[in-house]
Image (tube, grey):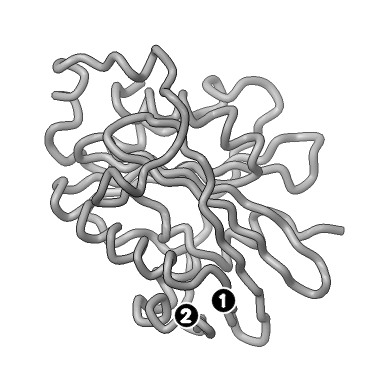
């Protein structure tokens, strides 16, 4: 039995997703027409930081995803006993940043879904909002730490998970984007998670989980994160 996505996501750096500060870090194909032609009015909708309640309304829901998706209950996350081995830069950020705690931004919202019928096929979305400067500086530090250590280990209590990261192509949605593949190895088994983040002014959209589901729902997540429901 392979590692479930929820298991590996709880042990990895969802906080490592975000927008790089330089266009040189953004790679990928031409964006879809629906997202490449955003108007000034649309951009104005995210020109100022949004509250957590406003972000919650912009999260994907079952109607957006289609049939077969079940929302997961949100659980409190505690990472006090987590440490990183083999990546000093990442370890300096602390356990909360390294293993799935929320990004240190003023406003945030999160939702997770399981695709019924395919055990372990899951997708989650996180939205963050703050000033553009804070988003850029905060995510840049995390991105640089991740780029410096393509392989490292995460210890949570007595559990040790090896994490291997590599860049993935990211469609050019929004202002800036970043995507990566994360392979988690534990007890002779492994699981792959894809994480893609898109910056739209003062909002960061992060979609993580099974690669096929991330690719299938990214455009809609970015569009809804930008425009609202």
Q: Callout 1: few (<14), some (14-19), or many (20+) C-alpha neighbours within 10 Å?
A: some
Query: In the structure shown, which secondary structural element does the residue marked by tag 1 occupy?
Result: strand
Whether residues under marks 2 and 1 lie with C-beta atoms below 8 angstroms apart, the answer is yes
Front position in the image: 19 or 117 = 19
Q: Which mark is residue 87?
A: 2
Separation of residues labelled 2 and 1 (CA atoms) = 6 Å
For the point 22% across and 53% down, the residue is 136
Question: Looking at the image, is 217 positioned above or below residue 196?
Answer: above
x then y, percent, for residue 212: 66, 35
Rendering quarter of residue 184: bottom right
Eyeballing the image, is 13 above or below 42? below
Query: Which residue is label 1 attached to?
Result: 152
In the image, taking residue 134 as reference, residue 206 lies left or right, namely right
Left or right: residue 144 versus residue 28 is left
* Image location of residue 127, percent across then percent down: 36, 43
The answer to which of 206 and 116 lies nearer the viewer is 206
Q: Residue at x 57, y 32 (%)?
A: 215
Q: Quadrant location of residue 53?
A: top left
Instruction: For the C terminus, give its image quadrant.
Output: top left
x, y percent for residue 8: 64, 62
User: How many numbered marks does the figure carry?
Assistant: 2
- Asked where in the image residue 68 lies, by quadrant, the reply is top right
Q: What residue sits 40% from the left and 12% below the top?
A: 33
Q: Is residue 49 above or below residue 47?
A: below
The quadrant in which the N terminus is found is bottom right
């Amino acid at each position: 039995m392979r590692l479930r996505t929820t298991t590996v996501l709880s042990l990895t750096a969802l906080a490592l997703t975000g927008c790089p500060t330089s266009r040189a870090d953004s790679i990928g194909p031409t964006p879809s027409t629906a997202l490449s032609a955003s108007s000034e009015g649309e951009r104005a909708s995210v020109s100022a930081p949004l509250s957590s309640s406003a972000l919650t309304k912009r999260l994907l829901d079952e109607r957006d995803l289609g049939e077969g998706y079940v929302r997961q209950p949100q659980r409190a996350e505690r990472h006090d006993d987590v440490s990183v081995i083999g990546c000093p830069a990442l370890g300096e950020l602390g356990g909360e940043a390294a293993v799935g705690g929320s990004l240190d931004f003023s406003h945030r919202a999160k939702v997770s879904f399981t695709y019924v019928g395919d055990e372990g096929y899951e997708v989650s979305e996180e939205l963050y909002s703050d000033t553009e400067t804070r988003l850029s500086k905060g995510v840049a530090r995390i991105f640089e730490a991740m780029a410096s250590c393509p392989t490292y280990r995460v210890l949570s209590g007595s559990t040790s998970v090896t994490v291997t990261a590599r860049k993935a192509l990211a469609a050019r949605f929004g202002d800036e984007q970043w995507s990566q593949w994360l392979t988690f190895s534990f007890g002779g088994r492994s699981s792959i998670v894809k994480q893609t983040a898109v910056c739209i002014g003062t909002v960061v959209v992060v979609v993580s989980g099974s690669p096929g589901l991330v690719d299938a729902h990214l455009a809609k997540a970015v569009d809804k994160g930008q425009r609202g429901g």
